[in-house]
Amino acid sequence: MRGTSSTSFAEVLRQAEAAFTGSNGALESEAQELFSVADAIDSSNQLVRTLSDPGRPAAVKEATVRALLGSRVSPQTLELTLEIVQRRWSEQEDILDALELLGASALLAQAQSEGVLEQVEGELFEISRLIDDSGDLTVALDGARENPSQRATMLRSLLEGRTHRLALALAARAVGRRTATKPARRVEEFARFASDRRRRVFAAVSSAVPLNEAQQSRLGAVLAGIYGREVQMNLQVDPDVVGGLRIQVGDDLYDATVLARLSRARSQLVA
């Protein structure tokens, strides 16, 4: 995605990952719902145009989504879909990509919670290479271009029991969407999306009161300075937090006082 779409997706992804943090193991079903929503919208050119049209009133888009999905998906899937259609996108196809990547993100969040994110990433790259290196498999997948579900079934039958279930779910989705992109490249795109997630640092931030945008920006800058990379913050309000702020980054636990000392120490070192 480029330009406006890239910005819109980054905003939605932040909200989605914060929601995924508290999903209590329901992420695989969440992912499948998001994939199904993308497919339902993709099945109608009129739907895609309506939901991606920047000139269409937000109320019309919301009504369309609610009529399409109703109670057939979880409240979280419905809210994420509404978040997507209410934003601006550079290309109409980008709303489909956004929904699909949110589904992929849910599966990767599950992989991270199970401690297998690196394994899933590696296996996705291996599956991409497997398709590239096998002329017969490439021909078979290309031959089923008009039947994406057949391609997904084909890949599942080949890799079942040999690949982590989450890597297989992602690879099956990659080849199971109707698109002009080659199956191997689609799997590779998901592998790179997993790589991006693994390189990010995630922080669970609890504050006694909600943090405003300026406070979030300053906190993000401090954490980025400590860890040397962008830190994805999942924010929640907890009135019982001692000192007003608690940050958990992996095994590292900070309160507001410790964080302030680290920030001052870093400033002195830079000076």
Image: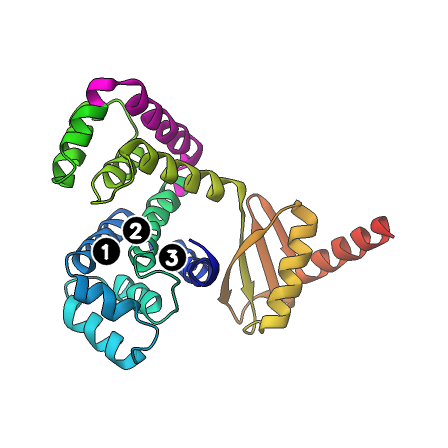
Mark 3 against mark 1, which lies toward the viewer? 1
Judge the density around disc 3: few (<14), some (14-19), many (≥20) Cα neighbours within 10 Å: few
Compared to 213, does 11 lie above or below? Answer: above
Residue 78 at x, y percent in the picture: 26, 66
Residue 267 at x, y percent in the picture: 81, 55
Question: Can you see residue 55?
Answer: yes
Compared to 190, does 219 lie above or below? Answer: below
Marks 2,1: beta carbons within 8 A: yes
Local SS, label 1: helix
Q: Which residues are magenta?
A: 113-137
What residue appears at the point 41 percent right and 62 percent down from the top-left corner? Answer: 12
Local SS, label 3: loop
User: Which dot marks residue 38?
Assistant: 1
Query: Is the stretch drawn in magenta largely helix, strand or loop?
Result: helix
Residue 202 at x, y percent in the picture: 52, 50
Q: Magenta stretch containing residue 98, yes or no?
A: no
C-alpha span from label 2 to label 1:
6 Å
User: Which dot marks residue 209?
Assistant: none
Instruction: Kindly identify which residue carries mark 2.
Output: 100
C-alpha span from label 3 to label 1:
23 Å
Q: Magenta stretch containing residue 116, yes or no?
A: yes
In terms of sequence position, does the residue under pointer 2 or pointer 3 come before the other? 3
Question: Can you see residue 156?
Answer: no
Amino acid type at mark 3: Gly
